[in-house]
Amino acid sequence: MKKLRSAFFLIVLASASSITIAQQSPAPRLIGVDDLFDFREAHDPQISPDGQFVAYTLSANSLKDDKSETRIYMVPAAGGDAVALTAEGNSSEHPRWSPDGKFLAFLSERNEGKTQVYLLNRLGGEAQKLTDTIQDVDDFVWAPDSKRLVLILRDPSPEELEAAASKGKEDAADKPAAPKKPKAKSPWVIDRLQFKEDTVGYLDRRRTHLYVFDVAAKATTQVTSGDYDDDDPAWSPDGKFLAFSSNRSKPDPDATYNWDIWVVAADNTDKGANLTQVTTAPGEDRSPTWSPDGKWIAYSMQFDPKLFQYSTKHIAIAPSTGGEAKVLTKSLDRMATTPRFSPDGKGVYFIADDDGTLQLCLVNLADGKITRPVSGHVMLDGYSVAKDGMVAASLSTMDRPFEIFSASGGKLTQLSHANDAWLAKFKLSAGEYLSFKSKDGTVVHGYMYKPVDYVPGKKYPTLLRPHGGPVWAYYAEFQDLGQLLAANGYVVLLPNPRGSTGYGEGFSKAIFADWGNKDFQDDMAFVDYAIAEGIADPDKLGVGGWSYGGISTDFIITQTKRFKAAISGAGAADYSSMWGHDQYQRDYVTELGYPWEHRATWEHVAYFSKIKDVTTPTMFVGGNIDWNVPILGGEQMYQSLKALGRETLLVVYPDEYHGFKTPSHIKDLHERYLAWYAHYVKADGSPARPPEPPEKPVEAKPVKAGN
């Protein structure tokens, strides 16, 4: 095990002056596939209680080690050099300061063990393991007295209980236990309505609950229980109570979206038998946060659970003892999340999804006025507020990966500089945020990346990239794949069609139970716009996306022959076959109804019946353990096109969920993107497949008749 570096006193050493040797910097060049594994992303900023430092995480993918790793860094809030607080080789995340400022706690999995809470003393020294639970610690929050934590733990599995018992016997005997023969895996016995989840697999009755952990005694007390998942814990300012969110609807939480805010006494010994229900609305009430005086709880909520993800999220406050709630952002009509009270208790901060950006807003409780401490064309995905009102935020822009910034008095100051040297090496596409009209006159927006050496008046091969979701959007963030494609001579179109967030609930719900209609028109309108502007070559068009972007790709190629090539990542076109196979049973019923009762609705959104019309050479890709959009969808499309004699390919990546984690797989996927598009869109004579890597993904072969 590698040791952690000594912590806080290293700031002095890191800030010391050094000798600079003048060197001639090489001229910036085009970005390549391998270069995408050299930039890093800074997230989760946490300001120290005295406001002097900001702790944050820095994540990177390593092709050499074929894994991703996250380390914790710290930088002076006034600016200066950053210092690493955790060593290489041990991924660490979720840094949180103790309220007294003496410690920094974080989560880490070490020595092939469970994820536990570790503690760094501000006076220096190595991190010490604080918790030793038999299961992973999913999350934790410091109590105001700095003497306790609340932990989120999932009920232990039989295997975890058995391992703990064996360890106890081993410790009692003071000798290692005799090696055991590996046992056959037990079957999954399932009796839940919601029985699958990506990255987890089959679900049983083990649930997540809250536990209060005494730091000095290292003793843990369970404070919630039951056949429910408890999440989002928040301590009351006096440390006597815990607010949390939980779906405890009857008769079955798996059938509804009804999360509510609850309060439990932190010192209770009845495992939460007596709770106070703070909210009662039928939608999702999540992310509770207490006012400084303890009288109010702010949270995110939705008005219409029947719209589920299409429904706008708002910020509301309710008395902490329960009572009538007040919605603070009703007039905004934008997704509002991640609420936190201002230090003076006079306002509530939140993140707003607005017009292709994520910005930090502050609503004044007295008059309802909303201001924007961090605005502009940015993507903000995390923030922390100091007692004096200074904000630390993780921000990305179109030309810069996520870094940590401070915001005070309307001024943004970059604190972390993890990517300065990396960015200086490359010529990048500036990117543009554009608006255009769809077929029915609706104004739509999207991002365009032109080739790095773009020449006005010249037409370029163009790739349409529909986004995932469908309720999501492209934002003003650094798009590494967009930059790679632009470096290879493509115009890249990233539309935010109807269904996207950031443009109001009406815009979002326009595709409810009507996929592939208005969003298809909007996607095509962006292509038409690029052609009309003399930018896109109409004879060299390609399309491809991931998740709902893959689903969009599948219905696009069934409706038009305009594209020379397509790549469908984690897509699907026959949704009735996904019923009971993926994780979306609740969403299907809410939006489409039961497939045996509403066949016409299911067939309306499915384009599998038009598969015979597809002539576009299409590659289907995905992970073999993806339960979000299973590879089944790609397999069905591939099998059908192969049977029809079309140009097609299926690439299945082993041990990958919906979001790929293995750097070598991501590299392989990007190389396949470039090869497929170069062969079919550019028609440059290059092979449609890159050279096979030493350890190649499994490529499905066509099934022969009679087998």
Image (cartoon, helix red, strand yellow):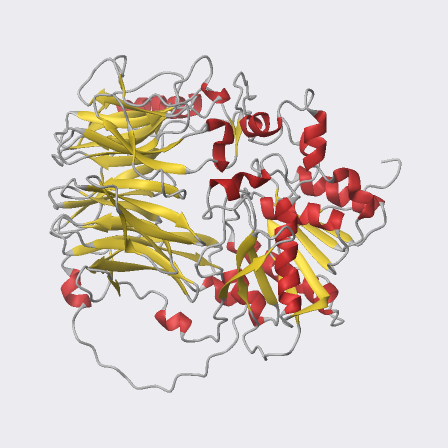
The C terminus - image quarter: top right
**Left or right: residue 199 compared with residue 121:** right
Can residue 87 be seen from the camera position used here? no
Residue 105 image position (x, y, % from top left): 22, 43
Residue 119 image position (x, y, % from top left): 21, 43
Residue 670 image position (x, y, % from top left): 59, 60
Camera-nearest residue between 596 and 163: 596
Which of the 4 quarters of the picture holds residue 21? bottom left
Which of the 4 quarters of the picture holds residue 390? bottom left
**Residue drawn at 16 percent across, 28 percent down:** 295
**Residue drawn at 12 percent across, 30 percent down:** 238
Residue extending furthest front? 441
Q: Is residue 520 above or below residue 14?
A: above
Which of the 4 quarters of the picture holds residue 176? top left
Q: Is residue 640 above or below residue 681?
A: above
**Left or right: residue 299 compared with residue 126:** right
**Left or right: residue 314 compared with residue 199:** left
Residue 558 image position (x, y, % from top left): 75, 47
Camera-nearest residue between 306 and 415: 306
Can residue 655 be seen from the camera position used here? yes
